[in-house]
Image (spheres, helix red, strand yellow):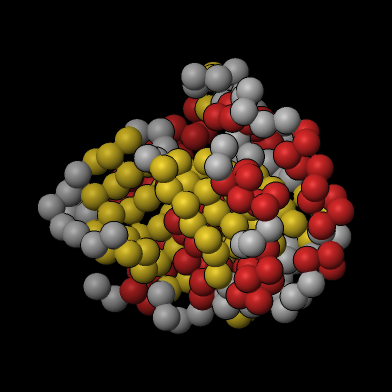
Amino acid sequence: MDLLSTKAMLKNWLEELGAFQAKKQYTDLKISTKENPSDLVTQIDKDSENWLIEKIHSSFPSHSIWGEEGGFIKGNSHYVWIMDPLDGTMNYTHGLPIFGISLALQSRGETILGGIHFPRLAETYLAVKGEGAQCNGEDIQVSSEKNPQKALLGISIPYAKIAGKISDDYLAPFHSRMRGIRTFGCVVFDLCQLARGNLDASLALKMNPWDILGGMLIIKEAGGDYIHQQVSDNHSLLSANPKLLSSLKNDKAFSRLFEI
């Protein structure tokens, strides 16, 4: 499989779908909820996933697909596409510009290609394993900040999953340990901002695989590293440059959150 040509194809898919999502954002979105009232899904989520499935099957009919909305579609090869057709649905439904489309391609369980596109920001992040990471064709790199007290931290927490398990005192320590905290409501945005050096650290708790796999490759290829904990299908991720991560991983405030 030619990953560089597939990367170019992925870029086209992301940007074509992104134009559709941006156009539809201020229309009747037909919003519904999942198990929790704060966990939203729109017809755009479903239409976007179906569109991506058609594109993948048209070019790679033997590949499996694992999507947030439709579940697992088994193929007869070792390649699997993992997709979140619209990350940040809450932002999307409220007219905010921070939402994105994320795809990752795995071969025998290893992520080899990742792409994330932010339609309203006109930013496309791409990475092939071993080939570096780019935003809009320009190479990106994580920050070099080593001091936690000078570091800006992004936090992504799916409150529907941890309701009753976390209180404000869990987050309070970070206000003195870090320079600042940002919560954007879109984990793929956090991961991409970490990869390009705008965030120095990122903490994502109890995410689904489609939320983070593409971003994890982009971070690695941008020179970053992470601590990844998986419990069933829940993934928690602490990401930073290697030197800052070394300082953060021994901080009890972080380990306490990982234990939730």
Tell me if residue 69 can be seen: yes
- The residue lying toward the viewer, choosing from 157 and 46, is 157
Q: Is residue 21 above or below residue 201?
A: above
Residue at image location 75% in from the left, 57% down from the top: 153
- Placement of the C terminus among the 4 image quadrants: top right
Coordinates of residue 193 in the picture (x, y in percent):
68, 62
Q: Is residue 200 above or below residue 73?
A: below
| Quadrant that contains the N terminus | bottom left
Residue nearer the viewer, 75 or 8: 75
At horizontal 67% and vertical 31% (from top left) the residue drawn is 166
Drawn side of residue 6 relative to residue 165, left or right: left
The residue shown at (55%, 29%) is 161
Horizontal placement of 108 versus 29: left or right? left
In the rendered structure, the answer to whether residue 80 lies left or right of residue 246 reads left
Q: Position of residue 143 (x, y in %)?
A: 71, 75
Please state the horizontal and vertical placement of residue 135, each as a whole percent of the image. 61, 70
